[in-house]
Amino acid sequence: MSVIFLLIAVSTVVALFFLAAFVRAVKNGQFDDDRSPAVRMLNDDTPRQNQ
Amino acid sequence: MTMTERFQYDNRIVKNFLFITILWGIVGMLVGLIIAVQMVAQNTPPDAWYYWIVRPFTALGELEWTKFGRLRPLHTNAVIFAFVGNAIFAGVYYSLQRLLKARMFSDALGRIHFWGWQLIIVLAAVTLPLGLTTGKEYAELEWPIDILITLVWVVFGINLFGTILKRRERHLYVAIWFYIATWVTVAMLHITNSIELPISLTKSYSWYAGVQDALVQWWYGHNAVAFFLTTPFLGLMYYFLPKAANRPVYSYKLSIIHFWALIFLYIWAGPHHLLYSALPDWAQSLGTVFSIMLIAPSWGGMLNGLLTLRGAWDRVREDPVLKFMVVAVTCYGMATLEGPLLSLKSWNAMAHFTDWIIAHVHIGGIGWNGMLTFGVIYWMVPRLYGTKLHSVKLANAHFWLGTLGIVFYAIPLYMAGFWQSGMWKEFTPDGYLKYKNFLDTVMEIKPAYWLRALGGLLYLTGAFIMVYNVVKTVKAGKLIANEDAEAAALEKVAAEEGGAHWHRWIERRPIQMLVISLVLVAIGGLFELVPTFLVKSNIPTISHVKPYTPLELQGRDIYVREGCYTCHSQMIRPFRSETERYGEYAKAGEFVYDHPFQWGSRRTGPDLLREGGKYGHSWHYYHMYDPTSMSPGSLMPPYTHLYEHDLDTTTTKKKIEAMLTMGVPYDKEPYGDGFADRANAHLQKQRDEIVAGLKKDNIDAPADKEIIALIAYLQRLGTDIKAKEVTAR
């Protein structure tokens, strides 16, 4: 059953990685705007034809 | 002031992944249909009216390479890693470029990724029918392919993160978070579960044994479903569903909460696959608790997807793309409610080892993954080729065939699972099992198996219609290999995310630096220490459990090779209905020498944990040659090739040495020092004893054939433990 410690350790490392990513994303303002990203992704920015 | 930059999206790589998705999808589903028919019709007598209809399928079942036990891993690997895998890559390569306003990091890496992944699939398609397998469900591929998977996954990672670093859009849309979680977690799962000791290019043993192996395997198995079949597809849903509906996702805030809640909960739910097994109780309960909690984020995601269509349901009536997506998301909701319910012990006691689970995974597989993939294909192909879909009518026909296929597949199997489980557990008023013969319970659910095969046929027919529709669409258009786009440059991000900046940040903070270093060293140390202490924990807790004899070990490898675990479990749960039928329930200490464990997940045939000594050698000898000779009506295919192939004894020494390396005490009683060199002598002696035993029943068995080793293993199964005498009153 000792393998469970390996699994817990590996899972925790991954969880910590995601926690760090989450904290960093929040600090960088990734989630400040929770409205416009959903709309912006609909626009594909095809270049204007007049060139 | 920022300048507008012009660049091009790479559509060629998307197209490649998309087409190969369709090809492998057809192959994987076809193999599924073949084994579905084999499962119900394998030993159809020639006088049955449908004999010639099923003959192509049953003929395959009589060949060595295309029996159920070898095709079932091929089916699961093909649909998971080839069909769904390539669909993920197609969707990621398409959406990532557009969400980040950047071309993929490297065209060359994209090509290496594409061809590398297809090479893996071709190798799988060759090795699995040949019987080269590790014997661990959904991780059957042998070690050289495991290494190849790791390398290709790294290439994908470089391309994924490289594109993120050179992006022109500061915000990472929620879909990208799902892709990142997929990459990180799958890498970890694959490596941890694939730790194995090779004895040749084509054979290895799982480093873990018994309960440990089971725990690692289902931690992997559960999270492979989570991070290969779920998170990447949620990413695709969050991109392609709003795109197809041309309206923003219902709640972006909810999508972010959905993501973070899901990834923090999912990883802990794995033990729910091992309820009532020899796994410690607390670990089982932990798995259940996390599984129940998972309902919240899963349903948050489902509702977010469906509510995106609020006020646009009239468009669902007209647009086949949206229809496919609605069914897909609904199936996701069903499967993610059912999963937690199945992790409740009382529910699990009934459904585990039955067809209920097969129905459950197909709601996820052909419902969620399949239907979403079809929706994405119908949406993408016209856009990649600058044209319109050839026929909306045909796409609608596909939709209805697919949906009916799911219904015909799943409902009969739900009923079959419920029904068969009831029969397994039914006692007569005087306290005996009502259905003493396991086969009787199989006969009762055969109609469900026929309906399931029909469901599969409908689903596959729909897929063929899609192929025609896609070919026609492609012919009408022209591939836009490089699609023009423009966006403002994002100078700061490059400085912030890439290069030396993050490192300087940490260098200025000595305390943090120290902590991070310590964590990294601790991880490294853990990986060094763990294997040794795993070996130590393999020392048996039950003194009379002994390592397999060389002949039994060889026989066990044949058992693994033939995929016996795809139909037979080796795990008797502590229920009266099971101990009455099979014998004493399973103990953790019994499995300490099992590399890999063979508990199985489905009982199409009876449990074999206590098979040893139940029948004579001759019974097995006849049964394996023609199962219907001993069990009239049996659906098990004949294993005549075991009577033709010589047992390869040149590997015996290596195998014993590998076991010694992993801590199996072949250097102690009853074997002793230097046993590896004497192993073949021991093997021959035991072989002669079995042949002599068969002789008494007037069978002239050749001693050097594989069947003798398999009989030795089957007769050993579960005999180390005797049922406890009842002493208390």
Image (cartoon, rainbow, N blue to C red):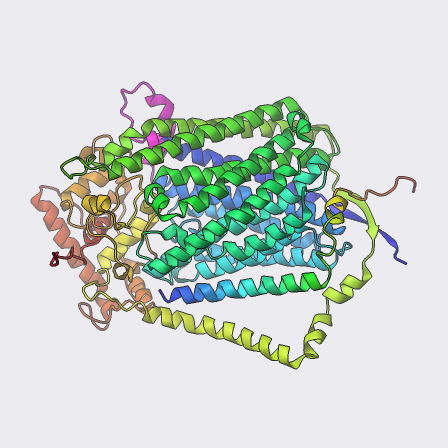
Tell me what residue is drawn at x 28 percent, y 29 percent. Answer: B444
Count how many numbered circles sit on residues in the image: 0
Tell me what residue is drawn at x 53 percent, y 25 percent. Answer: B401
- Return the residue found at the far left: B696
Residue B634 makes an appearance in the image: no
Q: Nearer the viewer, residue B443 or B342?
A: B342
Height in image: B199 above or below B566?
A: below
Q: Please state the extent of the stretch shown in magenta in the rendering.
A: B38-64
Q: Position of residue B142 (x, y in %)?
A: 43, 54
Q: Identify the image quadrant of residue A17.
A: bottom right
Q: Position of residue B658 (x, y in %)?
A: 33, 65
- Which quarter of the rendered picture does the N terminus of chain B lie within? bottom right
Height in image: B181 above or below B621?
A: below
Q: Nearer the viewer, residue B323 or B189?
A: B323
Report the side of A15 relative to B36 (left or right): right
Q: Position of residue B476 (x, y in %)?
A: 72, 28
Magenta span includes B399: no
Height in image: B661 above or below B33?
A: below
Magenta span includes B57: yes
Q: Nearer the viewer, residue B254 or B187?
A: B254
- Return the residue found at the far front: B729
Report the side of B477 relative to B268 (left or right): right
